[in-house]
Amino acid sequence: MRILCLIAALWLSLSLSAQDLHTYSFEQVDSLQADDRRATVVFLHADWCRYCRAMEQRTFSDERVIQKLNERFYFVSFDGESQEPVRYQSVDWPYEPTGRSTGTHSLAKALGTIDGKLDYPTLTILSEEHEIVFQHSGFLTAEEVLKVLERI
């Protein structure tokens, strides 16, 4: 019984110390920038992308990455195939269908296109002035993301 109580207490203390990654919508970032200017990290993903899920489960669950993102950045996780219109930087960004049940969001294209191509996952970092200062398509480990965040 004591061992069970000890395990439960240890689990509770670990779960209480774990931070949640603060995620924002593009609309929220617009509002927040008025009071607290920060760079914005945008994680572009798609539901069908296994590397995207791996980054969500591994990279963005790492305590060091969570702490760095929460302290210094606004983090936006955005489905590049979302059909919902987005208003960002006083511009209305629509979904652009390419077939009967396929398409890409225009904001994902604007932020994630590298050499004329949009791949998932893509990590894009915007400066406080909303300019793209970093883009990378493909899986990134927690260590790789931390190195990038340190340079920004």
Image (cartoon, rainbow, N blue to C red):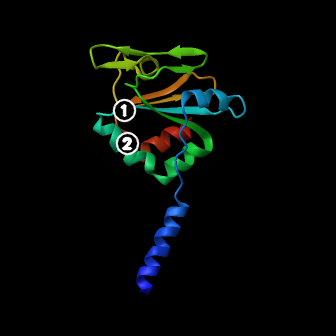
Residue type at the position of mark 1: Pro
Verify CB contact (< 8 Å) between mark 1 and mark 2: yes
Secondary element at tag 1: loop
Residue shown at 46% from the left, 19% from the top: 107
Secondary element at tag 2: helix
Q: Residue 66 — which label?
A: none
In the rendered image, residue 42, in percent from the top left (x then y), is placed at 49, 31
Quadrant including the N terminus = bottom left
Task: In the rendered view, tell whether residue 121 sits above or below residue 56.
Answer: above
Quadrant including the C terminus = top right
In the rendered image, residue 10, in percent from the top left (x then y), is placed at 48, 73
In the rendered image, residue 98, in percent from the top left (x then y), is placed at 30, 13
* Residue count near mark 2 (Cα–Cα under 10 Å), binned few <14, some 14–19, many ≥20: many
Residue hosting label 2: 55
Depth order, front residue of 125/3: 3
- The residues bearing labels 1 and 2 have C-alpha atoms spaced at a distance of 8 Å
Q: Quadrant of residue 24?
A: top right
Residue shown at 36% from the left, 32% from the top: 121
Q: Earlier in the sequence, mark 1 or mark 2?
A: 2
Query: Horizontal placement of 25 versus 119: left or right?
Result: right
Single out the residue that lies furthest toward the right: 35
* Residue count near mark 1 (Cα–Cα under 10 Å), binned few <14, some 14–19, many ≥20: many
Residue hosting label 1: 121
Q: Quadrant of residue 129?
A: top right
Residue type at the position of mark 2: Met
Single out the residue that lies furthest toward the bottom: 2
Residue 144 seen in render = yes
Task: In the rendered view, tell whether residue 149 sits above or below residue 132.
Answer: below
